[in-house]
Image (cartoon, rainbow, N blue to C red):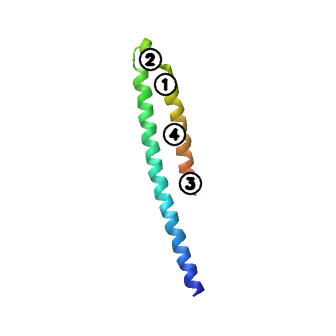
Amino acid sequence: MAVLMMILLSDIRKAITMTKNKDNRKKLEGQYRALEEHLQKIANEKSKPSEMIDQGLIAHWEKTVANCRQNIAKLERRLNQ
């Protein structure tokens, strides 16, 4: 009976780990998508004539890009564990 309980607990732990990995992969995909979108926004803004460039927007998106990169690194570390 105890062996059966240990096997069931092991299966439950594996299922929880697989669910967490799946969630982390989905989050990672979303972070990559957000990173790509914000890099595109920065490129579009920088391609405007110099008098029309909004440096405040670029600074904001660069902060968002940095946050995306940090989140990507964190999620990749979680997946590699």
Badge 3 density bin: few <14, some 14–19, many ≥20, Cα 10 Å: few
Decide which of tag 1 and tag 4 comes sooner along the chain.
1
Badge 4 density bin: few <14, some 14–19, many ≥20, Cα 10 Å: many
Contact (CB < 8 A) between labels 1 and 4? no
Distance Cα–Cα, label 4 vs label 2? 23 Å
Badge 4 is on which residue? 68
**Mark in front: 2 vs 3:** 2
Distance Cα–Cα, label 1 vs label 4? 15 Å
Badge 3 is on which residue? 78
Decide which of tag 1 and tag 3 comes sooner along the chain.
1
Q: Residue at x 49, y 63 (%)?
A: 18
Q: Residue at x 48, y 24 (%)?
A: 57
Q: Quick one: SS at disc 1?
A: helix
User: Which picture quadrant has residue 38?
Assistant: top left
Q: Quick one: SS at disc 3?
A: helix
Q: Position of residue 14 (x, y in %)?
A: 52, 69
The disc labelled 3 sits on which kind of residue? Arg
Q: Which mark is residue 53?
A: 2
Which residue is at the far right?
2
Badge 2 density bin: few <14, some 14–19, many ≥20, Cα 10 Å: some
Distance Cα–Cα, label 4 vs label 3? 15 Å
